Image: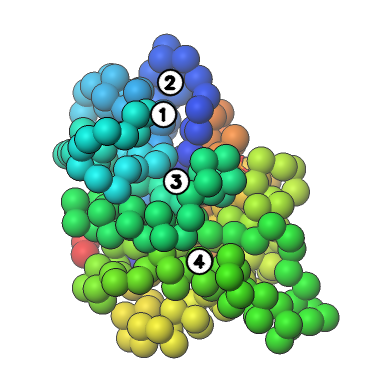
């Protein structure tokens, strides 16, 4: 088993000085939080100043892009190339629901990005999620069918991972983010998130047999210090993607602390 992973998605928030203060506060606090891998995803323009401001690197603190272009360079106005963040970013969020909804990213584009990340030694954090809550308790078979339809979460996974080799599976995180829970105060319950993670893991097992367990499945959507325990207690949930709560250092460090306590005993990404 690996350490749980907690990803901070700052989205398009903060000024440069706020980003430097927040990263400094997080840095000083996470030094003492063991057994959890923490990934900070600031706006791309703040990455280098934030990293420079930290002076030394904590073992379990990593950086990621919130979005990555699937090409090395060229006529792609406004995009960020993985080549530009070489040696500083270990991760990239790919296919976040806001990218899909506002910037019309398709499953095929997500697949290109996943493969490009892997070619460039960056670990993709692939987001998937449904618009409307599943009702597994009443309509289990029907809801599984919905997951397998065009745009359904299992189809999102299948397309995102098309052409990915088995040896790369351990570098992939699938983040289950129900769209109705993102940016609301309406998180899924731990039991609900665990049930969907179980379905995702089962699906991965059918696809990749033994290698399926190499893929980590995270939950995202209104995670905070009050509900984090509920998610981390679930054996099928390997980590979290945190939006708003990652902008408050006390809240975020508490989330990391609780994730570490609940899952302690696991080993880190570094050990792979
Ligand atoms: P939230 O965002 O925690 O603010 O709901 C999560 C996300 O979009 O990744």
User: Is there CB contact under 8 Å for labels 1 and 4?
Assistant: no
Q: Mark 3 to mark 4: distance in Å?
A: 21 Å
Residue at left 58%, top 65%? 151
Residue farthest along the right direction in this orientation: 138
- Are there few (<14), some (14-19), or many (20+) residues within 10 Å of tag 1? many
First along the sequence among labels 3 and 4: 3
The picture places residue 205, in percent across and down from the top left corner, at 43, 84
- Image quarter where ligand 1 lies: top right
First along the sequence among labels 1 and 4: 1
Q: Mark 1 to mark 4: distance in Å?
A: 25 Å
- Are there few (<14), some (14-19), or many (20+) residues within 10 Å of tag 3? many
- Are there few (<14), some (14-19), or many (20+) residues within 10 Å of tag 2? many
Q: Which quarter of the figure has residue 71?
A: top left
Q: Which mark is residue 7?
A: 3
Q: Is residue 191 or residue 127 the one in the foreground? A: 127
The picture places residue 120, in percent across and down from the top left corner, at 19, 51
Query: Which residue has dot 2 on it?
Result: 19
Residue at left 37%, top 60%? 111
Q: Which mark is residue 8?
A: none
The picture places residue 161, in percent across and down from the top left corner, at 37, 68
Query: Which residue has dot 1 on it?
Result: 43
As helix, strand or loop, the secondary structure at mark 1 comes to loop
Q: Which quarter of the figure has residue 148?
A: bottom right
Q: Mark 1 to mark 3: distance in Å?
A: 14 Å
Is the shortest distance between ligand 1 and the CB of mark 3 under 8 Å? yes
For discs 3 and 4, the disc positioned in front in the rendered view = 4
Residue 117 drawn above or below residue 207: above
Query: Which residue has dot 4 on it?
Result: 156
As helix, strand or loop, the secondary structure at mark 4 comes to helix
User: Is there CB contact under 8 Å for labels 1 and 2?
Assistant: yes
First along the sequence among labels 1 and 2: 2
Residue at left 21%, top 61%? 271
């Amino acid at each position: 088993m690996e350490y749980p992973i907690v990803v901070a998605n700052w989205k398009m928030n903060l000024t440069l000085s706020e980003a430097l203060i927040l990263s400094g506060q997080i840095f000083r606090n996470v030094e003492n939080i063991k057994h959890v891998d923490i990934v900070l995803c600031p706006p791309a323009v703040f990455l280098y100043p934030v990293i420079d401001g930290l002076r030394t690197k904590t073992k379990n603190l990593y950086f990621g892009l919130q979005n990555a272009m699937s090409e090395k360079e060229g006529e792609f106005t406004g995009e960020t190339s993985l080549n530009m963040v070489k040696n500083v970013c270990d991760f990239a969020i790919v296919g976040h629901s806001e990218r899909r909804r506002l910037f019309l990213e398709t499953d095929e584009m997500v697949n290109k990005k996943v493969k490009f990340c892997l070619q460039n030694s960056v670990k993709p954090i692939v987001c998937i999620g449904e618009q409307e809550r599943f009702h597994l308790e009443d309509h289990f078979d029907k809801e599984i069918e919905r997951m397998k339809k065009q745009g359904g979460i299992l189809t999102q996974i299948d397309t995102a991972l098309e052409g990915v080799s088995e040896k790369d599976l351990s570098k992939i995180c699938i983040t289950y983010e129900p769209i109705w829970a993102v940016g609301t105060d309406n998180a899924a319950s731990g039991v609900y998130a665990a049930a969907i993670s179980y379905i995702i893991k089962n699906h991965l097992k059918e696809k990749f047999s033994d290698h399926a367990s190499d893929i980590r499945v995270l939950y995202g959507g209104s995670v905070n210090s009050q509900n984090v325990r509920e998610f981390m207690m679930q054996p099928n949930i390997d980590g979290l993607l945190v939006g708003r709560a990652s902008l408050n250092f006390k809240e975020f460090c508490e989330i990391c602390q609780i994730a570490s306590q609940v899952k302690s005993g696991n080993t880190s990404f570094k050990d792979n």
